[in-house]
Amino acid sequence: MPKQDALFADLPAEDAPEPSRISDMHRMFGVVEGKRCGDCRHFRRYEQGNSKFAKCDLTTQTGGRATDWKVKFDACGKWETEAMRP
Ligand code: SF4
C-alpha cells in the first residue's frame, strides 16, 4: 500500500520559512501588523480549469507556482483595500 504522506509531499510544512517573494516585499515596504495579503486589493485570484491560484499584482508574475501568493501572508506596507483606491 502506498504511503499517504506522499500525497502531501509538495505542501510546505507549517513551520516552513517565509518564501523570499513575500519577505522581499516586507524588506522593501515593511509589514502592516494584523493585516493579510488576502484582504489587499493587489491580491488577485485566478481560476483556470480546475486550478485556483493567486498573485500579487505589485510583484513579478509568471505562469508558474513560484510566484503564487498566499492569503495568509502577512501584509506588506503596500497593503490597501478597494476603498483606499485613489
Ligand atoms: S499586502 Fe498587497 S501589495 Fe503587499 S504583498 Fe500582499 S498582496 Fe501584495
Image: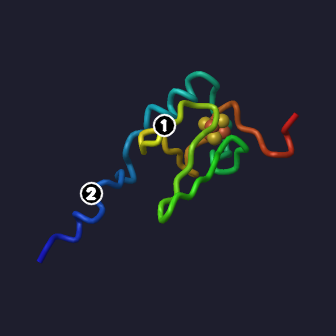
Return the residue found at the far front: 49
Quarter holding the N terminus is bottom left
> What residue lies at 46% left-to-right and 42% top-to-bottom?
63
**Mark positioned earlier in the residue sequence (1 or 2):** 2
Quick check: 76 left or right of 48? right
Q: CA distance from mark 1 to mark 2?
A: 23 Å
In the rendered structure, which amino acid carries the disc numbered 1?
Thr
State the residue in front, 53 or 73: 53
> What residue lies at 63% left-to-right and 45% top-to-bottom?
37
In the rendered structure, which amino acid carries the disc numbered 2?
Ala
Residue 12 pos. (x, y %): 36, 51
> What residue lies at 48% left-to-right and 60% top-to-bottom?
51
Please name the residue that numbered disc 1 is placed on: 62
Quick check: 44 left or right of 48? right
User: Where on the image, by quarter, is ligand 1?
Assistant: top right
Please name the residue that numbered disc 2 is placed on: 9
Indicate if the residue with disc 1 has its beta carbon within 8 Å of ligand 1.
Answer: no
